[in-house]
Image: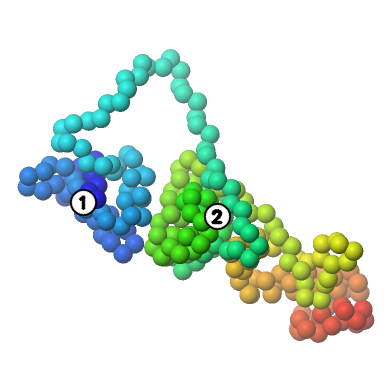
Amino acid sequence: MKIECILHREKGTVVEMPGKTYHFKPSEDDPRHIAEVTNESHIERFLQIREAYRLPRTPGQEAVDEVLEPESKAAPTPTPAAPPAVTLEPGQFLKTCGATFPPSFDLNGATYTLDEITHAAFGQSGLTVEDWNGLDEEHRATKIEIVLDELEAGEITVAKLPPKVVPLPHETAQDGAAPLGTVEQASGPAQGLPALDGAAEQSERAALDAQYKERFGKLPPSNMKLETLKAKLAAGAE
């Protein structure tokens, strides 16, 4: 598909996309700055940037849909839209692009995890979990970049993922009560995204230390192994 860049630079416009470089420039018989784009995710990305790219029009012709009378007062600022909410079935997960993006982003004074951005991108895509996970890394990365750009521009809002409770190995539920555990950011399998082993171990250790202090009135030695700490808590003796 041909895409037109309406920003006419002297030497054209060069754009780097994952795995492809595009040069929007005029030809001998066409003054428009045109490039051929065949990658569907790249087409989607260019057309999202309405102030710079569009489908080609006849040279010299502009689209005029409606003539609006000037308003006496400024129009209200539109409320940012929220992508559709994501509900995952037990055992389902969403693939992220952890090799392409950092684990978190600071945008407009707020911090968002890659998991939260991925959930928003999935909600926008309209795909099933299976189709999303079947996308190649480049397609997923492009959809995540779109969400990041829209979030930074204030066009959308991204919901925070709720915390989850991770049961400790020696704890079980009694009388139908929910098991005790540690509270983590929702990024593990229960929310569709795998948690890092190191982060889970640190969180588990912190919870065990807190239980030890509550039971024995002091923190355990820092060099005490995790297995030993669990055994002492289970036995109820130092």
Check disc 2 and report the residue beneath it.
119
Residue at 80%, 73% (x, y): give it. Answer: 208
- Name the quadrant of the C terminus: bottom right
Q: Which of 117 and 207 is in front in this view?
A: 117
Quick one: label 2, few (<14), some, or many (20+) residues within 10 Å? many
Residue 52: which quarter of the image? top left
Q: Position of residue 95 (x, y in %)?
A: 52, 64
Check disc 1 and report the residue beneath it.
35
Which amino acid lies under the numbered mark 1 shown in the image of this protein?
Answer: Ala
Residue 185: which quarter of the image? bottom right
Which amino acid lies under the numbered mark 2 shown in the image of this protein?
Answer: His
Q: Is residue 7 left or right of residue 192?
A: left
Looking at the image, can residue 136 be seen? yes
Instruction: State the CA–CA distance, disc 1 to disc 2.
Output: 32 Å
Callout 2 secondary element: helix
Looking at the image, can residue 114 be seen? no
Q: Position of residue 124 (x, y in %)?
A: 49, 48
Residue at 42%, 65% (x, y): give it. Answer: 137
Residue at 82%, 80% (x, y): give it. Answer: 230
Quick one: label 1, few (<14), some, or many (20+) residues within 10 Å? some
